[in-house]
Amino acid sequence: MAAHAHGAERSRRRRWVVNRPLQFRFVNAMVVILCAMAVLAVAAVYVGGWLTLSSFELTGNLLMVSLLQTMCWTIVLELLAVTPLVIWWGVRLSHRVAGPLVRIHAALARMANGQYDVQVKLRAGDELTELADAINVLAASLHNRSRA
């Protein structure tokens, strides 16, 4: 039922950033996690590589040490290349929650002011559809009671 109710009212996304604080906190958390993973990966490669070189007594071999450093820098460059994609994906993912929250907040504000002819319409792929459906049922019930 929810798919039909919300699918019939599809609309285009006009803005991807609709709730800056929420979406930026989400994206920031994703970037911090990505950086932490990269730091751990560089540390693991460096320590593992250095221990391997030490066990074979190759720490004095400039070619092998250079290879180890190149592997670590490659991980850092991959982090720099992936970060914009993580930010873009974070904004897209957070919009699926932030967009409905903006619509739900507006509907509840109208209901608080006594306007019960409210209909929360979400786009395909949005989250919080069950909450929107419950608000729509509540609004219809209050609207019917206010007319009676």
Image (tube, rainbow, N blue to C red):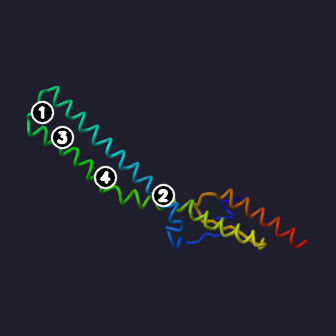
**Badge 4 vs badge 2, beta-carbon distance below 8 Å:** no
**Badge 3 vs badge 2, beta-carbon distance below 8 Å:** no
The CA distance from mark 4 to mark 2 is 20 Å
Name the residue that disc number 4 marks. Answer: 79
Identity, as a three-letter code, of the amino acid under mark 3: Leu
Secondary element type, mark 3? helix
Name the residue that disc number 3 marks. Answer: 68
In the picture, measured across the screen, residue 69 lies left or right of residue 133, that is left
Where residue 4 sits, quadrant-wise, is bottom right
The CA distance from mark 4 to mark 3 is 17 Å
Name the residue that disc number 2 marks. Answer: 25
Secondary element type, mark 1? loop
Where residue 141 sits, quadrant-wise, is bottom right
Q: Which circle's residue, 4 or 2, is located before the other in the chain?
A: 2
Image quarter in which the N terminus is found:
bottom right
**Badge 3 vs badge 1, beta-carbon distance below 8 Å:** no
The residue at 16%/31% (across/down) is: 53
The CA distance from mark 2 to mark 1 is 43 Å
Q: Which circle's residue, 2 or 1, is located before the other in the chain?
A: 2
Secondary element type, mark 2? helix
Identity, as a three-letter code, of the amino acid under mark 1: Thr
